[in-house]
Image (cartoon, helix red, strand yellow):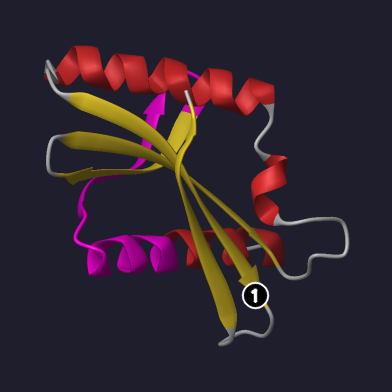
Amino acid sequence: MAKHLETGKKAEILAGIFLEEKGYEIIARNYRYGRAEIDLIVKKGIFVVFVEVKSLTNTKFGNPEISVTKNKVKLVTKAAGNFVYSTNWQQQIRFDIVSIVFKTEEDFEITHFEDAFY
């Protein structure tokens, strides 16, 4: 597996652990609808939260969260709409970003952006 794919997979695992420690329940990982994929779908209280996980090994060109493009937002919201419809979810939804910067293999910084887009 390519190094950037390994880093991305590790970031998704770490983001899941981070969110669980904050009281979220993971209800889906890598949810797919057509060409769209949602990294994590979590639940806390009345919210189902659709989480995009972004990671980098350095911030020379900016932080990971800035790489969430308009097209990515469009795809994630489309997949989220399908999830809401297919599960008949009747309560609140939210879109978050979890950004992870790896300083080394074991030293990293996680930032959680709640309500990052809609």
The quarter in which the N terminus is drawn is bottom right
Identify the residue position indicated by label 1 in the image.
102
In the picture provided, is 71 more to the left or to the right than 46? right
| Percent position of residue 110, x then y | 52, 68
Nearer-the-camera pick, 114 or 84? 114
The answer to whether 46 is drawn above or below residue 5 in the figure is above
| Percent position of residue 49, x then y | 31, 38
| Percent position of residue 111, x then y | 52, 62
Which amino acid, mark 1? Answer: Phe
Find numbered disc 1 in the image and state the secondary structure of the residue it sits on: strand
Seen at 44% across and 41% down, the residue is 96
Q: Residues within 10 Å of mark 1 (few under 14, many from 20)?
A: some
Seen at 32% across and 68% down, the residue is 17
User: Quadrant location of residue 61?
Assistant: bottom right
Seen at 65% across and 37% down, the residue is 68
Nearer-the-camera pick, 11 or 94? 94
Seen at 87% across and 64% down, the residue is 60
In the picture provided, is 87 more to the left or to the right than 73? left
| Percent position of residue 106, x then y | 56, 87
In the picture provided, is 56 more to the left or to the right than 97? right
> Which portion, as a residue range, is magenta?
13-36
In the picture provided, is 78 more to the left or to the right than 8? left
